[in-house]
Image (cartoon, grey):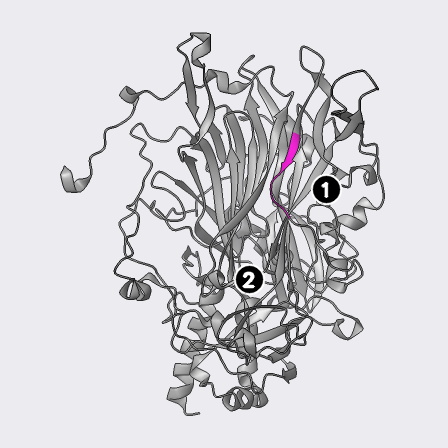
Amino acid sequence: MDYSSLKRFLLLATGAFLLLLFTHFSFHLPSNPPFSRSSPFLFHGPSVTTTKPASRNHETDIASHPLDPLTIQEINLARSILLSYSLFSSSPSSLAIHSLSLDEPDKSVVRSWKPGNTLPARKAVAVTRYKNKPYVLSIDLSTKEVVPLPVPESGYPTMTIEDMMSAPWAPFSDKAFNETITARGVRMSDVACLPISLGWYGQTEEGRRLIKIQCYSAEGTANFYMRPIEGLTVLLDMDTKEVVEITDKGNGIPIPSSTNTDYRYTVTKNNKPAWLKAPNPISLEQPSGPSFTVSEDHQVKWAGWDFHIKADARAGIIISGLGIIDPETGKRREVMYKGFVSELFVPYMDPTNAWYFKTYMDAGEYGFGLQAMPLVPLNDCPRNAYYLDGVFVTADGKPYVRENMICLFEKYAGDIAWRHSECPITDMEIKEARPKVTLVARMSASVANYDYIVDWEFQTDGLIRMKVALSGILMVKGTSYTHTKDVPSGEDMYGTLLSENVIGVIHDHFITFRLDMDVDGPANSFARVKLARQATASGESPRTSYLKATRHVAATEQEAQVKLALYKPEEFHVFSTEKTTRVGNPTGYKVVSAGTAASMLDPNDPPQLRGAFTNNQIWVTPYNKSEEWAGGLFVYQSKGEDTLSVWADRNRPIENKDIVLWYTLGFHHVPCQEDFPIMPTVSSSFDLKPVNFFEKNPVLWLPPNQEKDLPVCTATATA
């Protein structure tokens, strides 16, 4: 390949990979960015006029709350301390910083802190690797003291952005790889490759960080996911960039056509059917402005609710210090100390050579927050949204800003918070209704092909809804089949034929939330309220059966492990052991499940050993600051010795304790043709609902909408 061809190939390959993880990726760096933002494959969307806020300069940010994330100044200080630390100072260039974040003060310190008080000592926690050995270190930013922390027995830290950027390049320096690509009839300038975590399947994968690379043809489309070079897998040493093994079992499998796969509106609008009329744009107008306030960048207040919000490289959104004003007393009451997405487990159901290892842990392997893309005003979030940025670090410890990572907005979709009309037989002319307006905190992570939208929704009746939506593009498998009649009887395709030469592989998504509940304080218990059919005594009633609720307070972790069952209904209460209502009910919140799915893999299947935190939908553990990540601190190539299921096997007491509730939301995805070439968004949720928390329904105090209070909007065409 001559120099000009090589140069063109490198530019195009860079662009294709940037599309993978960094579409819409815009940021501000105090120093040089780790990669370029320009690419011929980047999709910037249609040109629109928006109310997108101007970029903020975070250089002068100062922490004002004990849980505020590290500022740019603090990151730079922590980095300088690390580079001069005796262990690393002899060869600072050998140090890779996988994460650098706030080492949060003890919970008791944060709970006792009041605005205006001096902040507790600011500390950072760094997850690093030095000469291929992992270290976890706590750094006191005042004293500059560095304290080593325990390191997990197996596994590696979350990949850095640089890991994910450099790994797909490495095979191109391997002659055998280039020859394989050429033999498959793909131009090198059209190749786009992905870094795919490989899980853990035995001793041969120990002792070094490995990753698998799979490639696609981007010829003729931005949607290269629909054009896999099927069967080609490169095993790569992530540190040395050595190609360990190349496997190609896809000879004879054609690369699917690019026809009608491009999803960009600038392309698809030209092919829109003439008879198709799109709905008119809709916008929620707030002439008096939003009802919520954001102070010091992280403190949110709305309709009695208040909480601290921040971006996190691994978790995405973290909600802390959640409380609500009691409408009866006017006093603030605690609900939850801290909540966030702890892990995402995505196993694909194809055991063949090029697919068996696709069992992703999106938070612990890739960083859920690192993959959170800037939100698109007017499309991802409505007109009056407020945007928050995230500050993260590169592998050399330098800070950068992920702009517009989180948005806050009030939502009204015409739903009803409460209503009642008296029927004519009462002779009472009463028609009462209250509109349902909620506050939403949203982020969206583009983890390769899949996009996850996570909403925290707060309601005026005290309910909190955690909602996860799946969008984006399928990861598909190439096949020689073009019609279902071509598939031999009895052959398992492990999915659905979606188009000519394209199979959508069956897979699952599990999203595990960690919810440190403090309902009216940290002294809480967990109760299972079981509903069971009871038979009436002979002659007691014309009825022969009824339902009875029996309450059981879990004493230990194992008693609180829940597998949801439709025909064995239960309620799940976290309640205060110190506060009751005026009639004696303990104040609490309950988990209300919506549609979900459970893992059906063999518990001894290697992916499920690592993902054993999905064995139950609900777990309850005693509070432990070090137990935050359901898949363990080090997930990459771990064996599963440091997971939620391992901690809970200790069967520790949880009654009248500071407890943590874990909930796993699940999806089974059997692809269908409507998932091609892009997927419709699907979502599910679960609620934390007040149960005897208030003396009466807080919606009583909500005013109804009146015509005089609302603006009269006239369409531009008729104005």
Q: Looking at the picture, how far across and down is residue 389, in whole percent?
A: 45, 47
What number is the disc on residue 120? none
Q: How many labels does the image show?
A: 2
Between residue 60 and residue 513, name the one nearer to us.
513
The percent position of residue 336, horizontal first and vertical second, equals: 63, 32
Q: Is residue 351 visible?
A: yes
Instruction: From the image, tell me which residue sits under label 2.
Output: 671
| Quadrant that contains the N terminus | bottom left
Asked whether the viewer can see residue 238, the reply is no
The residue carrying mark 1 is 565
Q: Left or right: where does residue 355 sit relative to residue 65?
A: right
Residue 527 colored in magenta in the image = no
Image position of 96 (left or right of 452): right
Other-residue count near label 2 (Cα within 10 Å), few / some / many at <14 / 14–19 / ≥20: many
Q: Secondary structure under badge 2?
A: loop
Q: Which of marks 1 and 2 is nearer the N terminus?
A: 1
**Which amino acid is tagged 2?**
Pro
The one nearer the camera, 299 or 679, is: 679
**Label 1 sits on what residue type?**
Ala
Q: Where is residue 237 in the image (x, y as percent from the top left)?
A: 65, 76
Residues rendered magenta in the picture: 590-596
- Tell me the residue at 63%/21% (across/down): 693
User: On the image, which quarter does residue 70 sit in?
Assistant: top right
Q: Quick one: 688 or 173, which is closer to the camera?
A: 688
At x 64%, y 83%, the residue is 247
Q: Residue 6 in the image: x percent, y percent?
A: 42, 86
Q: How crowded is mark 1: few (under 14 residues within 10 Å), some or many (20 or more)?
A: few
Question: What is the quadrant of residue 517 in the picture?
Answer: top right
Examine the rendered structure and indicate whether residue 672 appears above or below residue 6. above
